[in-house]
Amino acid sequence: MILVQLNETELKQLIKSSLFESIKELDLKGKTSIEKLLTIKEASVFLNLAQQTLYGFTSQRKIPFIKKGKKLYFNRVDLEKWLNQDKENYSEIVSDLSKRKGGKHD
């Protein structure tokens, strides 16, 4: 048994960090693959890109996506991996799309 004396602020911080860690663990274990999917709108916000830019990326197969019927979905983990893998190519891709749009960019 370990006895520790904490002031009120330290106790609150300990409780907060414990709750945060517990929630984080539950979040990672409890989510189904469906809950990890983002809509085009959510992916647009997550990536800070216009929806039209995402449509362009998907039509060129430059970004990982899932198509169910007429709807597009994006796996958040796959998008994070894509961002990390393509950091150097990202600005090049956006620049290329920008040139095709006549100089407009996000």
Image (tube, helix red, strand yellow):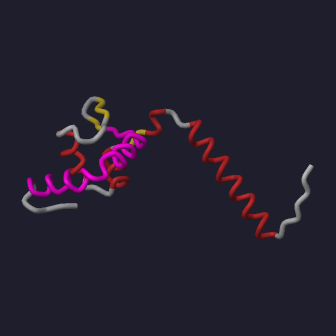
Numbered-mark total: 0
SS majority, magenta: helix
Q: What stretch is highlighted in magenta?
A: 73-100
> Eyeballing the image, is 54 above or below 65?
below
Quarter holding residue 59: top left
> Eyeballing the image, is 91 above or below 8?
above
Say which of 81 and 22 sits in front: 81
> Farthest residue in the front direction?
88
Residue 29 placement, left or right of 14? left
Residue 3 placement, left or right of 22? right
- Write the residue at 75% across / 64% down: 12
- Write the residue at 77% across / 67% down: 10
> Farthest residue in the top direction?
69
Residue 47: x percent and y percent? Answer: 34, 53
Residue 22: x percent and y percent? Answer: 67, 47
> Eyeballing the image, is 105 above or below 84?
below
Quarter holding residue 49: bottom left
Verify whether residue 81 appears in magenta.
yes
Verify whether residue 16 appears in magenta.
no
Residue 59 placement, left or right of 85? left
Residue 22 placement, left or right of 2? left
Say which of 39 and 9 sits in front: 9
Residue 46: x percent and y percent? Answer: 37, 53
Say which of 52 and 69 sits in front: 52
Residue 100: x percent and y percent? Answer: 8, 53
